[in-house]
Amino acid sequence: TSFVVLFELIYQSYARSLFTDIELQDLASAAQDKNRNLNITGCLIHVDGEFAQIIEGDHYAVLTYTTSFKTMKGTTAFS
């Protein structure tokens, strides 16, 4: 029997400018596609230009996913 140890990461970032509803839908759709491809799960929360996300999955997959946040267009202050 083999098992996978789940790794969980919580991060916060800020939008450089407010997102439109369409931009938020596009962002959520892209995140869902990426999550599916990396076999991870997540919860993205957006309120008034602030984002928080919980990501869970294989350690390497989660870290691979989060490296893209540091260069994500339109956001700043990844923490």
Image: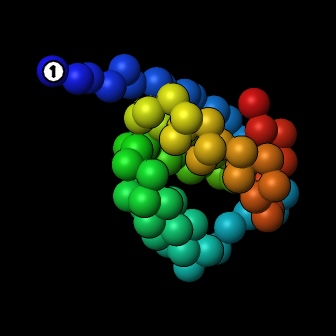
User: Residue 26: x percent and y percent?
Assistant: 54, 74
Note whether residue 14 is visible: no
- Residue 47 image offset from top left, x and y in percent: 59, 48
Q: x, y (%) of residue 73? A: 79, 64
**Relative to 51, is 29 above or below?**
below
Q: Secondary structure at mark 1?
A: loop
Residue 60, quarter of the rendered image = top right
Q: Image height check: is 74 above or below 15?
A: below
Q: Is any part of residue 55 visible from this angle? A: yes
Tell me what residue is drawn at x 41 percent, y 35 percent.
57
Q: Position of residue 69 (x, y in %)?
A: 71, 49
Q: Which is more toward the observer, 28 or 15?
A: 28
Kind of residue at disc 1: Thr
Relative to 20, is 57 above or below? Answer: above
Task: Tell me what residue is drawn at x 62 percent, y 44 percent.
Answer: 64
Report whether 47 appears left or right of 49.
left
Q: Is residue 73 left or right of residue 25?
A: right
Q: Residue furthest front?
A: 1
How many residues crowd mark 1 within 10 Å: few (<14), some (14–19), many (20+)?
Answer: few
Q: Which residue is mark 1?
A: 1
Instruction: Identify which residue, 59 or 12, lies in the foreground.
Output: 59
